[in-house]
Amino acid sequence: MFKGGRAPRPGRDGRVSTPVPPDVRALSRRTLSRNRRDVACATVLHSLHQLAEALVPVAIGVTIDQAVATGDPGALALCVLGMVVLFTVLALAYRTGARFSVRAVENEAHLLRVEAARRALDPRGERSGLRAGELLSVATSDAEQASLYVRAWVGLIAMGTAITATTVALLAIDVPLGIGVLVGVPLMMFLLRFPAARITRRSEAKQATAAGATALATDLVGGLRVLMGMGARTAAADRYRRASGQALTASVSAAASNGVYRGMVSAAGVLFLAAVAAVAGWMALRGRLSIGELITVVGLAQFLAEPVQGLGIVGQVFATSRASARRLVRLLTAPAAVAPGGRPVHAEPVVALEGVSYRTLRGVDLTLAPGETVGVLATDPRDAEALLDLLSGRAVPEEVEAGRAAVGGVPVHELDLAALRTAVLVEEHGATLFEGTLRTNLATGTDRGEEHLHEALRAAAAEDLVSGHSLGLDRPVADRAANLSGGQRQRAALARALAADPPVLVLHDPTTAVDAVTEEAIARGLARARADRAPAGATLVVASSPALLARADRVVVLEEGRVRALGTHTDLVRGDSGYAEAVLR
């Protein structure tokens, strides 16, 4: 349930969508708009609280002049009653207004976190240039900081109300004194704008360096085993120490700017208070002010220091929220990594590459029909990556120099993303397993029951993952499968791909972390699982494994981006020395 504003309406696909803010100003306006009810209530109540606080010295001055100086018991009783009402309003207004304000901030922080997470998890991907750790920082820390824009606006209006009420009261007592306050406060706030710009820059630098350190820590922890195996743990620690040191320096710099700014605000407020009190005292000595009016003026001047300092703090909050809003806008407005079309797959999902030139590929022709298994040996890893990008829809159409990649006769970039994902599953070499259980990692939405999962595990030679653990399919899996070996992770990922049972399955080096015996078992299980599919599934295996390539109907050899050879594994081993050298080991 969304509080404090209208909830975003779900679209036809059931997903909640909100307009993407094109810049920081649009994001700020939307923040106020979708929390307008809570913001309005908080603003009114906080303004009422400040107004009541401003009236306290006025009420005290009136009490002295009208009740204490005159000795009138009735006037004294009336003044005391008025003071009780005033302090009751003051307390209740602040408490209730704070609830509305906090609710608006927390609601906006939640919405921004959801938006950032949705953008980061969008199936189309994004080209913001932010790493995983930086995305985490944007979706948490920056979302929280940007939501404080609500509190800043509420504080700005409330403090403005307090200053206005104080100025009116001072004008009623003495016009020159009120004019002095009216001119002095805006002038002081104008001068304080200059250091606020410095805070914005340093806050943005602090958030950026902290996000960079988080991203590096995420990468290092994820590859800790590899680093330890390579003996690079010390170098990695030194690298993180430098990144963390940069984040520390930026944080200290931002904190120093904030401290200096707050000191300037406090000093300006105190000096202003002293000036007003000195002028009021001089007026009282000259007989222009009564005792009650003098007490009122001194009390108002003392109170005025609070909203003046509050305005300075509001400026600081505006600066930090703008810095975080810039990073949020960078993520939310980042172009999609994939720009799919809207066409469905009507015909059988035959994969066809016709004279494709993309990145390192040059004039590649390749066809994969239902029921076929085709192996691809790429002597250059860049060729394999380019081929996978084409089949997964990640290739930008403008970067395809010639030819086309089609599924079911429709160019890949014209297909609806859901239709492409349903027809073609590209299982990357570096597939990721998520924290949970083996069952939740294997579940693909097909909902065919537990036996179907066991069949996929058998085909991937991964039954030991279940039989070797007391919890079976409910075996715990840590984040990125840190509690599994490399071979276990690879086989579990392959089992997940087989459980999805797509019409076209594309595998990239699915057996590099297993021994030769297990590799042979996987090759047999994969061929059997894909042949048993009704209708038989098409399989494209990009690998150098002889066990996998031997079961392909034909093998395509890519060398320097071109198709250098085509034939069965047996024929190529006998007649192509380069092929035999690459696959036989």
Image (cartoon, helix red, strand yellow):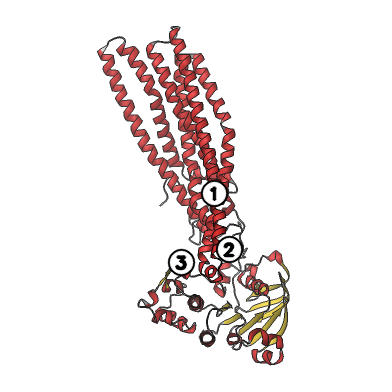
Whether residue 104 is situated above or below residue 351 in the rendered picture: above
Q: Amino acid at mark 3?
A: Asp
**What's the amino acid at mark 2?**
Arg
Say whether marks 1 and 3 touch (CB < 8 Å): no
Q: Secondary structure at mark 1?
A: helix
State which tag comes first along the sequence, 2 or 3.
2
- Residue 299, percent from left and from top: 40, 21
The circle drawn on residue 124 is 2
First in sequence: mark 2 vs mark 1: 2
Residue placed under numbered mark 1 in the picture: 207
Q: CA distance from mark 2 to mark 1?
A: 26 Å
Residue at 44% from the left image edge and 44% from the top image edge: 105
Decide if residue 197 is on the left or right side of residue 55: right
Evaluate if marks 2 and 1 touch, with contact meaning CB atoms under 8 Å apart: no
Q: CA distance from mark 2 to mark 3?
A: 23 Å
Q: How many marks?
A: 3
Q: Position of residue 322 (x, y in %)?
A: 55, 43
Q: Can you give x and y, in whole percent of width and height, for residue 20 in the image? A: 56, 51
Q: Tell me if residue 258 comes above or below residue 187 in the rendering.
A: below
Image vertical order of residue 28 relative to residue 474, above or below? above
Q: Nearer the viewer, residue 164 or 263?
A: 263
The secondary element bearing badge 3 is classed as: helix
Of circles 2 and 1, which is in front?
A: 1
The residue under label 3 is 479
Residue depicted at 33% across the width and 27% down the height: 87
The label number, if any, that marks residue 443 in the structure image: none
The type of residue carrying mark 1 is Gln
